[in-house]
């Protein structure tokens, strides 16, 4: 027996129509653009976290250095200079040190040499790569 194929049988034979292919392609493109946007946001957040961690590490490093010194050594450095560092991608990190003297009654004194103890503050300023706004972190310790 011989089977003759008609155009009608050929059309139902399999495959996809052009409309089905275009709809599938549009769905794949929407998914790809969504993943691309998510990837960009993850990269920006990773960059922000790296800058933030490095800036804070610089502040903690300076604070630990000052905390390990005696009161006399800290007094010899007053007034402190402004320290500027540049990170790997050129981000600027500015560190400033402020020293406040306190007497035993927790009052602030102007003469640091006659203070019972000193509060040393390190301000770390940098620009957030995520929001493009300035960020300040403050670290403080007591020096006897």
Image (tube, rainbow, N blue to C red):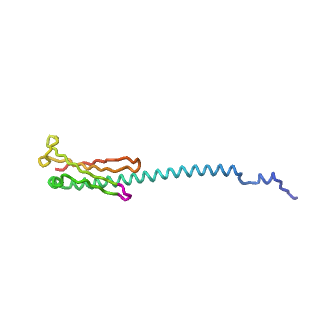
Could you say which is closer to the camera, residue 95 or residue 141?
95
Q: Quadrant of the N terminus?
A: bottom right
100 with respect to 4 (left or right): left
Q: Residue 29: where, in percent of width, then height?
A: 59, 51
Residue under the image location 42 percent in, 53 percent down: 46
In the image as oriented, which residue stretches furthest toward the left?
Answer: 114
Could you say which is closer to the camera, residue 92 or residue 102?
92
Stretch in magenta = 87-91
| Helix, strand or loop for the magenta stretch, by majority | loop
Residue under the image location 18 percent in, 52 percent down: 78
Residue 65 is a magenta residue: no
5 with respect to 65 (left or right): right
Residue 89 is a magenta residue: yes
Residue under the image location 63 percent in, 52 percent down: 25
Q: Quadrant of residue 77?
A: bottom left
In the image as oriented, which residue stretches furthest toward the right?
Answer: 1
Q: Residue 56: where, in percent of width, then height?
A: 32, 52
Q: How many marks?
A: 0
Q: Residue 43: where, in percent of width, then height?
A: 45, 53
């Amino acid at each position: 027996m011989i089977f003759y194929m008609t155009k009608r049988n050929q059309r139902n034979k399999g495959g996809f129509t052009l409309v089905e292919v275009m709809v599938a392609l549009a769905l794949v493109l929407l998914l790809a653009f969504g993943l691309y946007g998510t990837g960009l946001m993850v990269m920006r957040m990773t960059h922000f976290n790296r800058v933030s961690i490095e800036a804070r590490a610089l502040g903690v490093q300076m604070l630990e250095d000052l905390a390990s010194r005696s009161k006399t050594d800290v007094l010899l450095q007053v007034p402190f200079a402004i320290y500027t560092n540049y990170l790997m991608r050129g981000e600027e990190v500015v560190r400033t040190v402020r020293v406040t003297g306190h007497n035993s009654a927790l009052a602030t004194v102007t003469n640091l040499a006659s203070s019972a103890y000193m509060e040393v503050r390190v301000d770390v300023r940098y620009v957030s790569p995520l929001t493009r706004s300035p960020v300040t972190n403050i670290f403080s310790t007591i020096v006897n």
